[in-house]
Image (spheres, coloured by chain):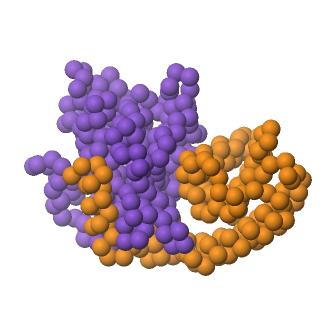
Chain colours: A purple, B orange
Amino acid sequence: MSMINYASREINCKLVYYGPGLGGKTTNLEFVFNKVAPNARGKLISLATETERTLFFDFLPVDLGTIRGFKTRFHLYTVPGQVYYNASRKLILKGVDGVVFVADSQIERMEANIEAMQNLYDNLSQHGFNITALPFVVQYNKRDLPNAATIEELQAALNPGWPVEDPARQRLIADPYHEGENLIQEVGGQWIERAPYFEGVAVTGDGVFDTLKAVSKMVLKSLGST
Amino acid sequence: MSGASSWSFREEDSNRIHGILVEFLREANARTGMIVDRTGQMVATVGEEPSFDPTAFASLTAADFSANDQLARMIGEPEFGSLFHQGEKESMYLADIARRVILVVLFDNRTTLGLVKLRVRQTVSELSKVFDDMFTRGGAGQVQMETGFVGEAEDELDKLFGA
């Protein structure tokens, strides 16, 4: 639910980083906080436990500057990844404009990834949202680890695609981020669409801005005609 | 996409809200009145300019209210219509408006909780009318940026995060 305030000429959009515990959601925000010029971002607010696990959320506002007279700002939120904090996760999704799913590439975390993805679907649908209709990107984090699953395995498990029902959208769309791959394509007579994905190493910042930029652009596109 | 649940806020809405809050602050002798939407965005600030970061404040306010909503449900209440946080010198009172936004009142010992509560009740009903009007008015196409906005915004994104 982006809010356009014509009185103060502001646009605020809400992006939520979702995913399993210890997957790197907070690390993504910390990297953005450290790398974006201080005048373009606010404070990083973390509601965390004493052991630095996210308890409720992390929050970081990022200013895009004034565009066509509108001060445009993205509000970045993370959710707590641990399974038992679901009530908090649901609250953070309220009014979301775009979602980044931060998956942990380690093969041992595959099940936790799948569970978190299912949880995202469930919680969004309780807010009346459908993930396939929202700006949505997937980040496969921790690509530097030796026990990382392959991208093919991760895509098959977490981003297998959803059917494209609208005939107008049933056409080949290449993935602008990966040569030779498609976001929308026909597979066995069925048109399917996948969310854009990115490989990341959030601790070093690899892929962090690419991910954020992609979802931000999708949110902006959903705001208006080009 | 996100348009269905988006809402927009016009100059005349701002003026109406501003007028109601100015009157409220005067009657309640409170320092600052703010409107925060349930997703954590600051909608309006009237009265003494707060010294804190309003963006962070708004996100925490919405989280505070949402968490308390869930607590209310657990004890069998549909919601807590208002919350009160008492400090030694500064206190805050929060009240739900039309289930969509939150009125936040900052006050100190120049007034009393009783007076603030009394005046909030009237103010909430006036503001509810304003917001009900706004939400019923908003429809498809309401939130649509002018041509060229997206392109320029994308350029800014490239500048900020590197092309």
Instruction: Residue B20: give x, y in percent of width and height.
Output: 74, 71
State the residue in front, A107 or B14. B14
The residue at 22%/64% (across/down) is: A170
The residue at 38%/33% (across/down) is: A27
Taking A128 as reference, is B163 left or right? left
State the residue in front, A172 or B53. B53
Quadrant holding the C terminus of chain A:
bottom left
Instruction: Residue A116: give x, y in percent of width and height.
Output: 42, 36
Q: Is residue B6 visible?
A: no
Compared to A97, does A102 lie above or below? above
The residue at 35%/26% (across/down) is: A109
Toward the left, the furthest residue is A180
Taking B160 as reference, is B21 left or right? right
Give residue B18's quadrant in the image: bottom right
State the residue in front, B72 or A4. A4
Instruction: Residue B85: give x, y in percent of width and height.
Output: 76, 43
Q: Is residue A212 visible?
A: yes
Give residue A110's quadrant in the image: top left
Instruction: Residue A19: give x, y in percent of width and height.
Output: 41, 37
State the residue in front, A57 or B149. B149
Q: How many marks?
A: 0
Taking B26 as reference, is A221 left or right? left
Give residue A139's quadrant in the image: top left
The residue at 68%/75% (across/down) is: B16
